[in-house]
Image: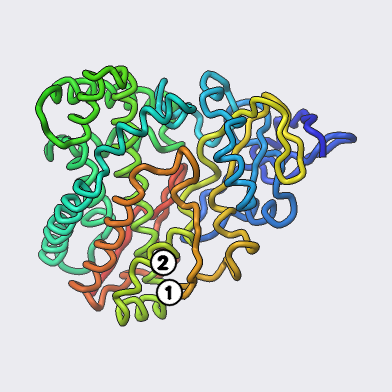
Amino acid sequence: MTTTTTSPNPENAGSTGTAESSGTPHVHFWAVPDLTGLEFDPLLAKVLHEDPVTRVRLPHGEGHAWLVTRYEDVKFVSVDPRFSRQAVYGRSITRLAPHFIPMEGAVGFADPPDHTRMRRVVARAFSARALRSLREHAQDVMDGLLDRLERHGPPADLMELVNRPFPLAMVSELMGVPDGDQPLMATWSDAIISAGAGREASERAKADMARYFTELVGRSHGTGKETLAAVLADAVDEGTLEEHEAVGLAVLIQIGGAHAVRNNSANMVYALLTHPEHLARLRAEPALLPRAVDELLRYIPHRNAVGLSRIALEDVEVGGVRIAEGDPVYVSYLTANRDPSVFPDPEKLDFDRGYNPHVAFGHGPHYCPGSALARIESEILLDSLWTRFPDLRLAVPEDRIRWQRGALIRGPETLPVTW
């Protein structure tokens, strides 16, 4: 396979398929369908097994990009410094969203040593002591939400009453966002992270959220608090961060902590409600919970398409394919988690999977800094929910559950349950 690109037919840009001409590689025009439930993207499944380092064109942006799907290749690209996130900024690379989501200077598009410097600051907010305190707070928050669920009575929408407010409350507590401002956070985050909201709404929400965190970090200077806003303010005072870097970090963590955990925790609940034998096993063996959460993280396709891209800074061979200097590259953590060379019978949800080195939180320098908190939240939610409501079950048939459309992170719009 060469690195010469094809010239795509614009009329086919919205379809899923391949195009080729003499001397040029296949290009998959990836429409990225709105999938329901835990359905795995058929194009991802196809290329993992048939064309593991391939070219794709997504609905927005320009040109083509490489897509790397196998586990070892994904890990290689994720850690090799010849693939740069920073070099992406300012380029209209083919992508799922109609708008460019990260803010300028965001840690997600930084390379070492800048990335290392910014990540070190964030790590202070996720110390062992902080996580112990957050675990206690998480249980208190969950108990209060389940009290409200009980008062509401069946049927009830778990998304509205539990899965949406729980991670929002947790990341807001971490950040230092007052309770009264949480609805603002939810509205802005939804507009920024949705591919369907459109460029104008996303950019407006991003600017509003940046102004909010500029003020919050500004008010947190010298307070001595342990909130992330105060940690970021101290780092600005020390000269470790520029103000815009601190604000970018705050926005990124607030959105990721609320939006990603909201949807993934709802997907976990749905997975257990639709796999009753797994739920029964988990209830009978509560010590299995951490392993079950890890397997759910591996198994659930938690996002649509792919995340952030990288640029090859020189010619690099990946999986036997030469990727040329300047070419954009995506990795798929979803396909890496379904690679049969690492995970036997990968399409099976298996709580007995002893070796499970999944990459649901990413890999390498850009590994999710909030992964430990996300695991805590998932464990508390799954344990508490069925402890309080042992007969919890779906209130409607599976095919009547509405799933989010035009979303970057997959999840149900509503999750109606009864007990």
Residue furthest toward the right?
Answer: 22
Residue 252: where, in percent of width, then height? 35, 33
Q: Is residue 350 visible?
A: yes
Q: Quadrant of residue 314?
A: top right
Q: Amino acid at mark 1?
A: His
From the viewer's side, name the closer residue of 96 and 370.
370
Q: Secondary structure at mark 1?
A: loop
Image quadrant in which you'd find residue 330: top right
> Is 384 placed above or below 221 here?
below
* Residue 41 position within the rendered picture, expressed as x and y whole percent measured from the top left: 58, 54
Say which residue label 1 marks. 275
Q: Quadrant of residue 96?
A: top right
Please tell me which residue is depicted at 42% across the width and 68% down the height of the picture: 398
With 112 as the anchor, is 42 left or right in this view? right
**What residue is shown with label 2?**
271
Which quadrant is home to the C terminus? bottom left
| Residue situated in front as seen by the camera: 26 or 375 | 375
Q: Check disc 1: other Cα within 10 Å, few if <14, some if 14-19, many if 20+.
A: few
Q: Position of residue 235 (x, y in %)?
A: 25, 24
Q: Nearer the viewer, residue 123 or 23?
A: 123
Labels 1 and 2 touching (C-beta < 8 A): yes
The colour scheme of the drawn protein is: rainbow
Q: Taking 366 as reference, is 221 left or right? A: left
Vertical arrangement, residue 370 with respect to residue 322, above or below:
below
Residue at 75 percent across and 43 percent down: it is 18
Residue 268 sits above or below residue 371 on the image:
below
> For numbered disc 2, what is the local secondary structure?
helix
Q: Is residue 172 left or right of residue 113?
A: left
Q: Residues within 10 Å of mark 2 (few under 14, many from 20)?
A: some
Please name the amino acid that badge 2 sits on.
Ala
Q: Considering the image in quadrants, where does the N terminus appear?
A: top right
| Residue at left offset 58%, top offset 53% | 336
